[in-house]
Amino acid sequence: MTIVVPKADAFADAGEKKYAVTRNLAELRWIQYPGHFEQALSKAIVTPATVGSRFFDHRISSYEPGAYVESHVHKVQEQIYHVLSGEGVLTVDGEDRLVRANDVTYIPPGVVHEFHCTGNDNLVFLVITSPPSDEEQQPR
């Protein structure tokens, strides 16, 4: 397989040519982001830093049993959680929801949420966030 990855500074100037990027998940390292605990790991697949995306942050996450992300809320970001395998409890505005493979949850800005792996196996899910930053958007 041929991997096409742009130079590190390829996205420094929005006027420059953009590149399509193909990556295999095995190339990416697992990261434990702030606010995530007990082996709540993610791989940043499509982000402004990794591929120069402007509108999306797309990650795959794998939480070991007992792992979780603490309760938090986004000012402007919308999120989609798409569970691929395992099971857990997604708490949305104080309501616990048992989620399993093939469950998809949309979380609008301003909704408090947290996610816990409560099953016996890893909870694996996709997280799609837009926009990538939670700062108020400035007019163009």
Image (cartoon, grey):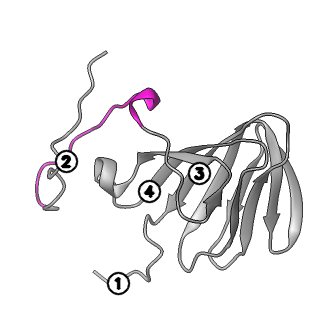
Question: Element at badge 3?
Answer: strand
Question: At x 41% / y 36%, what residue is drawn?
Answer: 28
Q: Of the residues tagged 3 and 1, which is closer to the observer? A: 3
Cα gap from disc 4 to disc 2, whole angstroms: 15 Å
Cα gap from disc 1 to disc 2, whole angstroms: 23 Å
Q: Along the line of sight, which residue is nearer the eye, 27 or 94?
A: 27
Kind of residue at disc 4: Phe
Q: Which residues are magenta?
A: 15-28
**In the picture, residue 62 is in which quadrant?**
top right
- Name which of mark 1 and mark 2 comes first in the sequence: 2
- Name which of mark 4 and mark 3 comes first in the sequence: 4
* Whether label 3 touches label 1, CB < 8 Å: no
Q: Is residue 79 left or right of residue 91?
A: left
Residue under pointer 1: 138
- Name which of mark 4 and mark 1 comes first in the sequence: 4
Identify the image quadrant of the N terminus: top left
Farthest-out residue, front: 38
Kind of residue at disc 1: Gln
- Name which of mark 3 and mark 1 comes first in the sequence: 3
* Whether label 4 touches label 1, CB < 8 Å: no
Kind of residue at disc 3: Val
Q: Is residue 125 left or right of residue 129?
A: right
Residue under pointer 3: 127
Question: Element at badge 4?
Answer: loop
Q: Of the residues tagged 3 and 2, which is closer to the observer? A: 3
Q: Of the residues tagged 4 and 3, which is closer to the observer? A: 3
Question: Element at badge 2?
Answer: loop
Horizontal and vertical percent position of residue 111: 71, 75
- Name which of mark 4 and mark 2 comes first in the sequence: 2
